[in-house]
Amino acid sequence: MLSAEGLITLERVTLDGTKIKANAGGNSFRRKEKLEAHLELARKQVRILNVESEQEEATAKRQAAARRRAARQRTSRLEAAIREVERLQHEKKHDRKDFVARASSTDAEAHVMRNGEGGTVPSYNVQTLTDTKHGLVVNVEATTDAIDYRQLKPALERCQTTLGKVPKQLVADGDYTNHASVQAAADCEVDFYGSWQDSWKAAERDAQGRSAGFLASAFPYDAERDCFTCPAGEILTRRACLNRGNGVRTHVYHPGKTVCMKCPLRSQCAPPDARLAWRRSITRTEEPAATTTFKAKMATAEAQQI
């Protein structure tokens, strides 16, 4: 109805997430073993109540039914919590080895998230898509992902499903601005505006404590020959190409095997404990065309104003 009246234009929408506290306490989160023990007790309670219901007088049947319903709901919540723990364990099996999955016995889907006040509470990350013409919310979704990094593409898909089309222009903050989001917007022909996260990073630092003349940025790159030149005048050629996903590739450059061994500037370039066979390497990141175009657009005054 709002669309028919012209109140929803989708000329420009904004996307943002906000943490909404879940109906669960922090002390309701349990490991799988503890949840299984609670589940067995809950199932036992259901069996007892089912037996008692056969012995209840007619006047007490309504109260007995309410008790049985509450016991069944408790059982269902615990079963859902165990499924959530198993899902988390499966997702995290290749991450930290010390990871211990937990789920809430009262709201299995809730995850502990950091809120705006710096604390951590069981929450949902609610994604809100708003038409800026009249400030009307055109789509909302509660997610269990604590960060907004992966939420732009799903928001566009929901918009297409709900309204039959995607917005012409979308504005979001830096939490959404990454290679995957830029590509998703480009695929849907949505004009996306957002602050790229690299813009706030500190100046280049070197873990080895090298001076400015020996940082990676001091090695000039020759695009035509696809090589770098080190401060000693030696050439670093491309030796490997690593696919980082989302169309991003990292190229690795090295000099010849023995070049760094006899370099007169070795003490300024190599780590103090470097082995004799050590040689300097430089990496160059190649971004997809969609990202390059996006960054060029965001460098304009018009995009900054938007």
Image (tube, grey):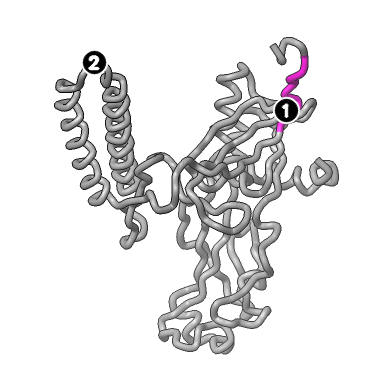
Q: Position of residue 88 (x, y in %)?
A: 35, 46
- Numbered disc 1: secondary structure: strand
The amino acid at mark 1 is Asp
What is the number of the mark on residue 131? 1
Q: Position of residue 179 (x, y in %)?
A: 58, 45
Q: Work out whether residue 300 or residue 250 is closer to the camera in this orientation and state it.
A: 300
Q: Earlier in the sequence, mark 1 or mark 2?
A: 2
- Badge 2: how crowded within 10 Å, few (<14), some, or many (20+)? few
Q: Is residue 178 above or below residue 44?
A: below
Q: Work out whether residue 174 or residue 126 is closer to the camera in this orientation and state it.
A: 126
Quadrant in which the C terminus appears: top right
| Residue numbers of the magenta segment | 6-13
Given contact means CB atoms under 8 Å apart, are the residues at marks 1 and 2 in contact? no
Q: Work out whether residue 74 or residue 252 is closer to the camera in this orientation and state it.
A: 74
In the picture of the structure, the residue carrying the numbered disc 2 is 58
- The prevailing secondary structure element of the residues shown in magenta is loop
1 left or right of 304? Answer: left
Residue displayed at 70% across by 57% down? 199
